Image (cartoon, rainbow, N blue to C red):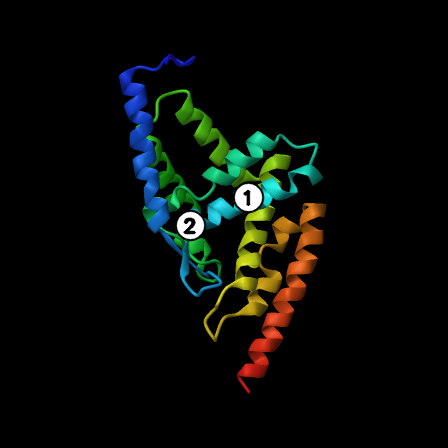
C-alpha cells in the first residue's frame, strides 16, 4: 500500500523516536487521585483535557478546533522529563516554565522539520495564552484538574479551599469556562463540607 506522504527513513524513525520519548508521560505522576484512589499520570490528565474540550467544542464554534486539540495534547509534554510540580508548590523561584520548555525542546530533537517548529510554536502559543484557542486550552486545563479533584478519592487532608481560587485568572477569561466552573465550584464546596464533617 502506498501512502500519499513520502518520508525518508530518517524522518520516519525520528518521529517514532519522539513518540518513544513521549511515552514517559504515562509514568509521570501528578498530585491528583482517580476515583479509585490511584495517583493519576500527566498522560491521563492530558487525555481527559482533550476529551473535555472535544465534549464542549460545539459550544465554541468560532475556534479552530484542530489547533485547540493540538494545544491540549502538547501543553504538558515537557513534564515527561522534569515531572509535574503541583500548583500549591509552584513559586516564581522554581522556574517551572523555563525548565518545562527546555525539556519540551529536548523531547522534540528527533522530530523532523517542519513538525518540530510547528510543535514549538504551539507550545509557545499555549504558554503565552494570547490566542482564543490558547485561552480556552488554559481554562479547560484548570477545569479538568478541578473536575478530577471533585471526583477523586483524595487524601483526608486535601485542600478543597485552594481549588476555589485555583486558575480563576484563566477560567474567568472564557464565558463557557465560567459556567462550567460555577458547577464544579459547587461540588468542591460540597466536598469541603463533607471533609469538615468527617474530621469532627
Residue 178's place in the image compared with 195, above or below, is above
Quarter of the picture holding the N terminus: top left
Direction from residue 6 to residue 130 in the image, left or right: right
Gap between marks 2 and 1 measured at Cα: 14 Å
Residue assigned mark 1: 51
User: Is disc 2 surrounded by few (<14), some (14 to 19) or many (20+) residues within 10 Å?
Assistant: many
Residue 168's quadrant in the figure?
bottom right
Tell me if residue 73 comes above or below residue 89 in the rendering. above
Q: Secondary structure at mark 2?
A: helix
Q: Residue furthest bottom?
A: 200
Residue at the disc numbered 2:
42
Q: Can you tell which quarter of the image residue 137 is in?
A: top right
Taking depth in this image into account, of 172 and 26 the one nearest to the observer is 26
Instruction: Identify the residue at image location x=35%, y=51%.
Output: 28
Residue 33 at x, y percent in the picture: 45, 62
Q: Nearer the viewer, residue 161 or 12?
A: 12
Among the two numbered marks 2 and 1 on one chain, the one whose residue lies closer to the N terminus: 2
Amino acid at each position: 500500500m502506498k501512502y500519499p506522504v513520502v518520508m525518508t527513513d530518517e524522518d520516519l524513525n525520528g518521529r517514532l523516536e519522539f513518540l518513544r520519548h513521549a511515552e514517559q508521560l504515562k509514568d509521570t505522576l501528578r498530585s491528583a487521585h482517580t476515583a479509585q484512589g490511584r495517583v493519576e499520570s500527566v498522560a491521563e490528565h492530558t487525555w481527559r483535557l482533550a476529551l473535555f474540550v472535544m465534549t464542549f467544542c460545539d459550544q465554541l464554534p468560532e475556534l479552530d478546533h484542530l489547533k485547540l486539540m493540538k494545544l491540549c495534547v502538547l501543553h504538558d509534554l515537557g513534564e515527561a522529563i522534569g515531572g509535574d510540580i503541583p500548583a500549591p508548590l509552584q513559586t516564581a523561584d522554581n522556574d517551572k516554565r523555563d525548565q518545562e520548555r527546555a525539556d519540551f525542546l529536548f523531547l522534540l530533537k528527533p522530530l523532523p522539520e517542519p513538525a518540530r517548529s510547528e510543535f514549538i510554536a504551539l507550545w509557545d502559543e499555549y504558554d503565552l495564552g494570547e490566542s482564543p484557542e490558547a485561552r480556552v486550552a488554559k481554562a479547560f486545563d484548570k477545569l479538568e484538574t478541578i473536575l478530577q479533584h471533585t471526583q477523586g478519592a483524595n487524601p483526608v487532608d486535601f485542600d478543597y479551599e485552594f481549588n476555589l481560587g485555583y486558575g480563576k485568572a484563566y477560567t474567568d477569561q472564557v464565558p463557557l469556562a465560567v459556567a462550567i466552573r460555577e458547577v464544579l465550584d459547587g461540588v468542591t464546596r460540597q466536598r469541603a463540607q463533607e471533609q469538615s464533617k468527617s474530621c469532627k
